[in-house]
Amino acid sequence: MNKNEFNILRDRIYANTGIKLEDKKKTLLETRLAKRLRILNLNNFSEYIDYLDNATTLEEWNNLVEEVSTNTTHFFREEAHFEILKDYLKQEVLSGNKKIRMWCGAASSGQEPWSLMITARRAGISHSFDFKLLSTDINRTVLEQGRKGVYNSKEISSLPVEFKTKYFSNNGDFYTIKQSLKPQAYFACMNLKKSPYLMSGPFDVIFIRNVMIYFDNSLRTVIVKECKRLLKQGGLLFVGHAESLVAQLVDGFEKVAPSVFRKL
Ligand SMILES: C[S@@+](CC[C@H](N)C(=O)[O-])C[C@H]1O[C@@H](n2cnc3c(N)ncnc32)[C@H](O)[C@@H]1O
């Protein structure tokens, strides 16, 4: 891949997803896309760019995005957030809130949304409660993994035994999220770069964690503004610990804990 080809691909990735690839990521992009060239039987990156330009569907574009998105995640990542969420949900139920909506905006392979579902159950939200969790991501492949909710023993190794038995069915090395958790969990592909977002809200809680680190401040501002629009008054926005400054980009939030913000 020459510098010009890198710049063309990098500019398109940035314009369409907000993901910023620095100069030092050229080799990484080259390595990851070499696989696409082999699969498509193309000789070089110039042919790959032509292929993208002439494609009549978004299929290859989606494949490209999947190669550049980082999907690192794990169950109950940044654990303190889940305790804060549990207390908030308990309080909402106690104070008579009969309809709770949550959005997880960079759900990756599902460990975060299923941690949210488990937390909702622990807060007393049963399968019959009017509760919905919408989980979205730009990467269709990881989203599908999330929807299935199947993990190996290594992936769930950090969970307490009680959670493993209560919320998963075990088959050999595989653990599947129990069916009883699934009807209130919805998965959909969504690009945070494309605003305004199509959901109607209002959400009681939004989790957008460990994704804004890949974006610049102008996109972060758009995302936080959209979260503010979609949250109910008093609703909570959770961001990643490395993103704790983002809510300050937009007025109308108060900080209630590290990287947790309430809409005023
Ligand atoms: C590092 S993972 C974080 C997963 C989870 N939120 C967590 O904290 O463990 C970042 C996720 O953001 C998704 N992502 C990246 N750019 C995106 C975009 N423009 N729109 C939606 N999702 C995006 C990636 O596909 C990836 O699954």
Image: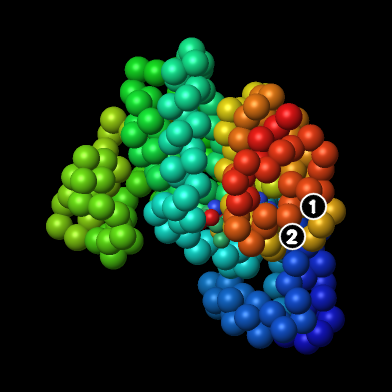
Q: Secondary structure at mark 1?
A: helix
Determine whether 202 is above or below 108 in the image: above
Split into 4 quadrants, where in the image is the N terminus?
Answer: bottom right
Residue 25 in the image: x percent, y percent?
69, 80
Split into 4 quadrants, where in the image is the C terminus?
Answer: top right
Horizontally, residue 37 falls left or right of residue 212, namely: left
Q: Nearer the viewer, residue 218 or 14?
A: 218
Disc 2 marks a residue whose amino acid type is Phe
Report which residue position mark 2 lands on.
Answer: 215
Mark 2 lies within 8 Å of ligand 1 (Cβ measured): yes
Count neighbours of disc 2 (C-alpha within 10 A) and say few if under 14, some if 14 to 19, many if 20 or more. some
Mark 1 lies within 8 Å of ligand 1 (Cβ measured): no
C-alpha span from label 2 to label 1: 6 Å
Quadrant location of residue 201? top right
Disc on res. 219: 1
Q: Secondary structure at mark 2?
A: loop
Determine whether 95 is above or below 124 in the image: above
Q: Residue at x 35, y 26 (%)?
A: 124
Disc on res. 97: none
Cβ atoms under marks 2 and 1 closer than 8 Å: yes
Q: Is residue 78 visible?
A: yes
